Image (cartoon, rainbow, N blue to C red):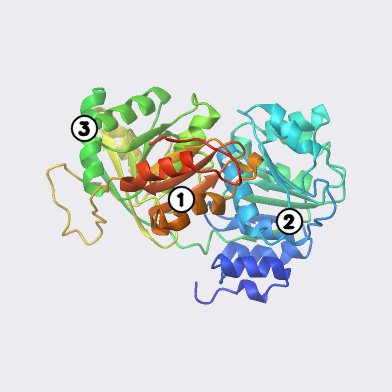
Amino acid sequence: MTDQPLFSALELRPQLQLQLQRLGYDQMTPIQAAALPHVLAGADVVAQASTGSGKTAAFGLGCLQHLQETKFHVQSLVLCPTRELADQVADSLRSLAKNLANTKIVTLCGGVAIGPQIGSLQHSAHIVVGTPGRVLKHLQKGTLHAHGLGILVLDEADRMLDMGFADEIDAILGFLPSPRQNLLFSATFPGEVAKVVAALCPNAVRVDVTQTETAPAIVEYWCHAPHRDLPARAQVLNEALQFYGGKLNLVFCNTKNDCAEVSLELQKMGVGAVALHGDMEQQARSQTLIRFANGSANVLVATDVAARGLDIDDVDAVFNFELPHQVESYVHRIGRTGRSGRNGTAISLVSDREMSRLKAMETDLNRGAMRLWRADSDTQGDPLSSHATLAAPSVHTLEINGGRKQKLRPGDILGALTAGGALAADAVGKIDILPMVSYVAVAKEQAGVAQQLLNQHKIKGRQFRARGVG
């Protein structure tokens, strides 16, 4: 990355350049270097890049560069496949826009009440980030107006189409003005994506950095496990976690039931595990992901569908409680580790009856046999082994009954906890501000003191309540 172009070479607004410096963004990633000059020039861009490649800044800086803060209408619309990705994109845009006064970014996703969203849109917004179904509903109800739209972004277009959003996207396009700038980002380009490109922006600048992206250094293992005895299989998983686990670990299950039960089994064994599956309410999903990202839970047990759209860079190891049925799913699962130049480990539990699936997967992958690991073995002599000891979570998460709607900011919560030296600043971890609720990670041994401070002192002249959520 030492020869990558610098953000300072771009003709960006001074406020954006200042914020990039504050965030420590110096060199551009390959997708940013390839796409941003065209995006800033106002061209349609179709870009192929992997998840976690820095594409949010590639289109986000374009949206913010052309944004007119004094004009309160929707100027950019970003469509994402999942609520979680939409939230992540919106948070990234808010961070980049910190020095642009009065910039309003709204998320519109399903799974939550539509009333508060309508209330937010009554005061308009500069940028809307949302999932296709909910965005379309607002357009149809007349609560979202797009007559002044200048930029449309389709983020992770392949996943949106995989999830069956083709009709919704087509219907949304019927509400949007023309001409406008179209930006499409996708990790793969199957026929469905090619059709959208042909209809949406046939003359777009094409960018593909996937051929030059460094392949992640992931060591793949498999180990023997009982076939249908879930508690016994979970015990093998726990042994693998204890051997290979790190600060953040992903466990994949093929069904929602297994996901919930495996999480419970691991909790009984003293592992800081949380589950993520399709039957969960949105608030529970958000809380689970926040706990995983801030380190108060270090094992996330998820289904493939639930994990779609997650963009967490620091996953130490991926564990397959059971091999998926498609090789593409396997590649996608293990690709969650070994990012940003780091090494990663993937280990799959395989019973005797599942050996044929393992052999078929090895054949399809065409990169040799996976290494066998046994619970009683010691592979520290293996130069490829990234052996680590599963770390117990060192932080605890507190939930506060107020968020962006109550004008809470991370600095307000940090100030309330550290005022007068009540708590050291390094005892406070990640702070997440959602529309109606906030979360703060604090050192485990200080969690009780932190909760007391938040409950006994006002923030911005108002009393809020805090409670521990794990």
Residue underneath mark 3:
235
Query: How far separated are the C-alphas under marks 1 and 2?
Result: 35 Å
Q: Secondary structure at mark 1?
A: helix
Residue underneath mark 1:
417
Pick the front one: 140 or 304:
140
Q: Is residue 391 above or below residue 307?
A: below
- Which badge, 1 or 2, comes first in the chain's sequence? 2
Task: Give x and y (percent) for residue 176.
Answer: 83, 41
Give the mark toward the camera: 3 or 1: 1
Label 2: how many residues lie within 10 Å, few (<14), some (14-19) or many (20+)? Answer: many
Task: Give x and y (percent) for residue 273.
Answer: 34, 36
Query: What's the residue at 45%, 55% (across, down)?
Result: 418
Residue underneath mark 2:
63
Q: Is residue 142 above or below residue 365?
A: above
Tell me where residue 122 sits by quadrant. top right
Task: Give x and y (percent) for residue 369.
Answer: 28, 48
- Which badge, 2 or 3, comes first in the chain's sequence? 2
Q: Secondary structure at mark 3?
A: helix
Q: Amino acid at mark 2?
A: Cys
Q: Amino acid at mark 1?
A: Leu
Label 3: how many residues lie within 10 Å, few (<14), some (14-19) or many (20+)? Answer: some
Label 1: how many residues lie within 10 Å, few (<14), some (14-19) or many (20+)? Answer: many
Query: How far separated are the C-alphas under marks 3 and 1?
Result: 40 Å
Q: Amino acid at mark 3?
A: Gln
Pick the front one: 361 or 390:
390
Q: Is residue 457 above or below residue 380?
A: above
- Kindly tell me whether residue 395 is visible in this rendering: no
Pick the front one: 389 or 432:
432
- Which badge, 3 or 1, comes first in the chain's sequence? 3
Query: How far separated are the C-alphas under marks 2 and 3?
Result: 49 Å
- Report the side of 360 relative to 166 (left or right): left
